[in-house]
C-alpha cells in the first residue's frame, strides 16, 4: 500500500513539473522578439565570434591539434586547410566544416572544437555611468542589468534616454530606451537583451526642447567596413607550419621592419600580407628545396592591431583591437571622457600611404544620430585625441 501511495505522489509531482515547464515555455514564446533575444530562442547553440579562443583537437594527429584565436576578420588558420571562417558558426558547425576539409588529407578524421575562452560576448558602455568600459556578457543580459554592472548612473545622467547602437548588415540600428519607465513597470519590452558588440550610451540631461529636436534626427547610417581580411603587421606572432617538415615549423614574431626569418627562405616580408598571401609566398620559395610543400600560417597573437588614445579621457593609453571597433566603442575602453573634454572636436590621426590624414569628429552628433557616419571604424595605428 505504501509503495502504491509513493508511486502516486511521484506521478503527481512529475505532472506538476511538466505543467510548469510547458507554462514557462508558452510564456517565453509569447514575449516580444526583442525581449526574448537571440540567446533565449537558441540557447543550446553558442555562436563563435572574434577574440574567442578555440581548442581544435584532431584524434591521433598532434600536428593539427592546437589552441587558436578567432581573428578580427572572423577566421582561424590551421595546417593543411589554411584559412577557415569560424565567426558566426557554432562549435558543432565548425567541427563539421573542419572534418569535411580534412578528409582530403586524412581518412575519416575525428575532430572536436571546444570554446576555451568566450571573449567575443561583450558590450561597450559609455557616457554618464560610474564605470564606463567593456562589459562581458554572462548569458542573457538586459539594459537594466548592464547599467548595474557599469556602476549605475552619475548625477548628470539623462535616465529617460539611454541609447543602444547595434551593427546589423553594416548599418547602425538604434534603440532609444526610457530607463525610468522600465523601473516604473512601463514599456517593459524596451528592456531589451543586449548582443555582443552593442554600444550603450547614457547622455547628460538635456532641456526638453533640445531632447525632442535630437530625437527627430535619427536616420540609420552606413559605415564602410573592411574587416574580412586580416593584414599581418609588426609585433604579430605567427605560427608557420610545413607539413612533415618539423625543422621548418616554428613560431616567429614579425619584426618592426615587417619581415620574418625562416630556414631556407631566410628573410621574407610578412607585414602588409594576409596569412593566405604569406602562405603562397612561402610555398613558392620552398618549392626550390621541397617537392610540393604544404604550408600554413596562423596568427597566434594579433599585436599589431592597436590604437592610441590620449587627451581628456580617464584612462589614456594603447588599446589592442581584437575585432572591428568603432570610435563610440574605444572611448569607453579608455574609461570615458573627463569633465573637461571637448566632445565636439575629437581628432583622429591616421597614416595612409606614408601621409598623415586628420579626421575631426563631433562625438555628440555621432551619439545622437545626427551624423551616424562619424562613428567611424578605427584602423590599426590610429591615434585618437580628445582635446
Image: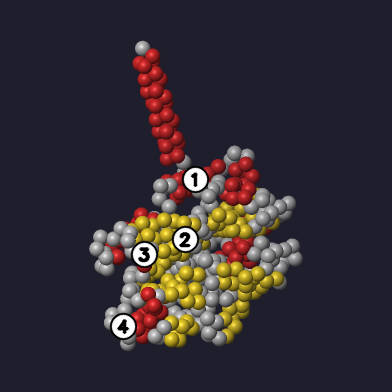
Residue 126 placed where, x, y %?
A: 63, 58
Q: Secondary structure at mark 2?
A: strand
Front-most of residues 45 and 240: 240
Along the line of sight, the residue nearer the viewer: 234 or 215: 234
User: Badge 1: few (under 14), some or many (20 or more) residues near its Cα, within 10 Å?
Assistant: some
Element under disc 1: helix
Mark earlier in primary sequence (4, 1) = 1
- Which comes before the other along the chain, label 4 or label 3? 3
* Residue underneath mark 2: 53
Image position of 86 (left or right of 147): left
Which residue is under mark 4? Answer: 290
Q: CA separation, marks 4 and 1?
A: 58 Å
Secondary element at image label 4? loop
Q: Residue at x 36, y 67 (%)?
A: 63
**In the image: residue 26, left or right of residue 361:** left
Write down the residue under mark 3. Answer: 62
225, above or below 188, in the image = below
Amino acid at each position: 500500500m505504501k509503495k502504491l501511495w509513493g508511486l502516486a505522489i511521484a506521478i503527481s509531482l512529475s505532472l506538476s513539473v511538466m505543467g510548469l515547464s510547458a507554462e514557462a515555455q508558452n510564456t517565453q514564446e509569447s514575449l516580444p522578439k526583442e525581449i526574448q533575444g537571440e540567446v533565449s530562442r537558441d540557447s543550446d547553440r553558442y555562436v563563435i565570434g572574434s577574440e574567442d579562443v578555440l581548442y581544435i583537437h584532431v584524434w591521433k594527429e598532434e600536428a593539427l591539434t592546437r589552441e587558436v584565436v578567432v581573428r578580427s576578420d572572423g577566421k582561424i588558420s590551421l595546417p593543411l586547410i589554411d584559412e577557415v571562417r569560424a565567426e558566426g558558426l557554432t562549435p558543432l558547425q565548425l567541427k563539421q566544416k573542419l572534418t569535411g576539409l580534412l578528409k582530403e588529407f586524412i581518412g575519416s578524421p575525428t575532430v572536436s572544437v571546444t570554446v576555451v575562452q568566450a571573449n567575443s560576448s561583450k558590450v561597450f558602455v559609455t557616457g554618464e555611468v560610474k564605470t564606463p568600459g567593456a562589459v562581458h556578457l554572462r548569458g542573457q543580459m538586459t539594459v537594466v542589468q548592464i547599467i548595474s554592472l557599469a556602476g549605475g548612473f552619475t548625477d548628470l545622467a539623462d535616465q529617460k534616454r539611454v541609447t543602444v547602437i547595434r551593427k546589423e548588415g553594416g548599418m547602425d540600428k538604434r534603440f532609444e530606451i526610457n530607463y525610468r519607465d522600465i523601473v516604473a513597470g512601463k514599456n517593459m519590452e524596451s528592456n531589451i537583451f543586449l548582443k555582443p558588440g552593442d554600444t550603450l550610451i547614457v547622455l547628460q540631461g538635456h532641456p526638453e526642447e533640445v531632447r525632442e529636436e535630437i530625437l527627430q534626427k535619427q536616420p540609420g547610417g552606413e559605415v564602410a567596413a573592411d574587416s574580412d581580411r586580416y593584414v599581418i603587421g609588426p609585433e604579430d606572432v605567427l605560427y608557420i607550419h610545413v607539413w612533415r617538415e618539423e625543422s621548418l615549423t616554428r613560431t616567429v614574431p614579425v619584426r618592426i621592419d615587417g619581415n620574418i626569418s625562416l630556414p631556407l627562405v631566410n628573410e621574407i616580408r610578412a607585414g602588409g600580407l594576409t596569412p593566405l598571401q604569406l602562405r603562397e609566398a612561402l610555398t613558392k620559395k620552398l618549392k626550390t628545396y621541397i617537392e610540393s610543400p604544404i604550408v600554413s600560417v596562423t596568427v597566434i597573437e594579433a599585436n599589431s592591431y592597436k590604437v592610441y588614445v590620449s587627451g581628456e579621457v580617464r584612462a589614456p593609453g594603447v588599446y589592442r583591437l581584437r575585432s572591428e571597433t568603432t570610435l563610440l566603442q574605444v572611448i569607453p575602453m579608455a574609461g570615458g571622457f573627463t569633465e573637461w573634454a571637448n566632445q565636439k572636436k575629437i581628432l583622429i590621426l591616421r597614416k595612409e600611404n606614408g601621409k598623415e590624414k586628420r579626421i575631426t569628429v563631433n562625438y555628440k552628433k555621432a551619439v545622437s544620430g545626427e551624423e551616424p557616419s562619424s562613428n567611424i571604424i578605427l584602423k590599426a595605428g590610429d591615434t585618437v585625441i580628445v582635446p
